[in-house]
Image (cartoon, rainbow, N blue to C red):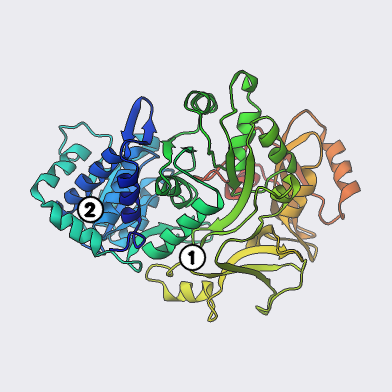
Amino acid sequence: MDSFESIPAVIHGACMKYPDKVAIVEGKARITYKELDERIAICAKAFISAGVKPGDRVGLWAPNSSEWIIVALGIQSVGAALVPINTRYKSVEASFPLQKTEAKLLFTADGFMGIEGAEVSARVRKEGGAEIRTININGDDMDEDSLSSFLSGAQNIDDDLRIQRLKNISDTTLSDIMFTSGSTGKPKGVRHLHGPTVRQTFNTVEENELSAVDRMLVINPFFHVFGYTGGWMPALFSGATVYPFPVFDVDQVLEIIQEEGITYFPGPPTIFHSLLEHPRLQDYDMNSLRFSLTGSADVPVDLIQRMIDELTFDRVVQAYGMTECGTATNTVASDSPETIATTIGKASKDLEVRVVDDKNEPAEAGEKGEIVVRGYAVMDGYLDDDDATAAAIDQEGWLHTGDLGTCDENGYFKILGRIKDMIIVGGFNVYPAEVEDMMREHPSIRDVALIGVPDDRLGEVGCAFVIVREPIQQDELFLWCREIMANFKVPRYIEFIDEFPLTGSNKISKLALREIADQEEIGG
């Protein structure tokens, strides 16, 4: 068996190479690579005992934890596909991916953010789906639906059968089905295969210089590519130590960085804003931090510099990607803080990325258009949706991201926003990311998010939600905006807000901001 063919095979190799090294740390608990290997094997045999066959799908609806990693690798070790579910979903939302994938089992963390396995299972049955056995990883060991009870089935399975299942996994075996956010309709299931996922993960390890000496703090949720294939997977591939964090807490993060000597800390800009604004930041020793990968949102230039100066990161880079293709572009440490903050870098290793016009022709340098991606990392397609797949991937194999951007003469890309998020003000196109970047230059503004709201005369105008560093009057901010940008770009409304509503993957939720605007009857 080629150890590069499947995700669990690669991690088994790391366990053989670093048996006594700590793989996962949760509070006081420490799991070595040897213990991790043993737990994955037990979990895999339990899946075989439970009747899970190659090609079956298994849901996982739980926060970041060692159990999440072990269950996920157990699923994949027997040739089944993992179906990660957003922990912020309610039962009505969680039932859709389970029914769509015809999941045989569902692992939950009952009680976390309102998660209730029995409730979602009942909803799937009510909507015409099959019976789903639920296993509660938070359950009492004596409970019939507990993880311990499930794992006890492993004793009935011969280890040779488990090993054979692992050997039968190829690079074209389905590894997981991850669902998109569904902001423009029903979520779509993105099919990922072992081979491309393994290849991209090794590229991540190489580009970010991950090694066995690293200690990675993973706050990005495991149900998202940032925390999964961009988080704990590259860490375990390289023999590093993973610190799963289920809920972001500034004090706890600062303490664990200091006490454990965290070296690698990826996350969206909102996380680092919170750390830098902590009143007792200087009381903590941050000197162990060497690398951060940020993204998922626009990054203010001064944030990159402050991460280097005040959080003492040696290297900060930004990456851009999506569920359908993983990481598509990235900056490198040698880029300036301004380049890292204002661009998403160049095409990632072994991938083609370009900007196309509305005729699907390559755009000139600096010309606005849609960012498209081609190469090994592009998804295998949407689950049971050939029409949506054909709409996303053209006949030449280019994945159309739906993101509007530019590419300069040096190959650096810049995101201007989602094509569907573009605001048309009296016939003029306004790109939210461009306006947000300009507004962040004001010394009183910490962060800003722009949305479009209805207007009787112009059709649509901008509404800027602003978080300030220090008090400023609206009139003063309006005047400043008029001095630095064309009148059609100037937000018609400015709303001060203490913090942005976030999605489950810690991005600013513009959908929630639109709901706020509707509730407050902004626009019209």
Relative height, residue 55 to residue 300 (above, below):
below
What type is the residue that disc 2 sits on?
Ile
Tag on residue 377? 1
Residue 193 visible in rendering: no
Q: Residue at x 50, y 28 (%)?
A: 261
In the image, 173 versus 505, the foreground residue is: 173
Q: Residue at x 43, y 70 (%)?
A: 381
Tag on residue 268? none
Disc 2 packing (10 Å; few <14; some 14–19; many ≥20): many
Relative height, residue 392 to residue 510 (above, below):
below
Q: Residue 127: x, y in percent? A: 29, 58
Please, what secondary structure does the residue beneath circle 1 have? loop
- Left or right relative to 39: residue 159: left
- Left or right relative to 283: residue 106: left
What type is the residue that disc 1 sits on?
Ala
User: Gap in Å between the C-alphas at discs 2 and 1?
Assistant: 31 Å
Query: Which is more foreground, mark 2 or mark 1?
Result: 1
Q: Residue 5: x, y in percent? A: 34, 63
**What is the total number of numbered labels drawn onto the structure image?**
2
Residue farthest along the right direction in this orientation = 483
Disc 1 packing (10 Å; few <14; some 14–19; many ≥20): many
Q: Residue at x 66, y 55 (%)?
A: 344
The residue that disc 2 covers is: 132
- Left or right relative to 473: residue 45: left
In the image, 382 versus 22, the foreground residue is: 22
- Which of marks 1 and 2 precedes in the sequence? 2
Q: Residue 512: x, y in percent? A: 58, 46
Q: Residue 190: x, y in percent? A: 43, 63
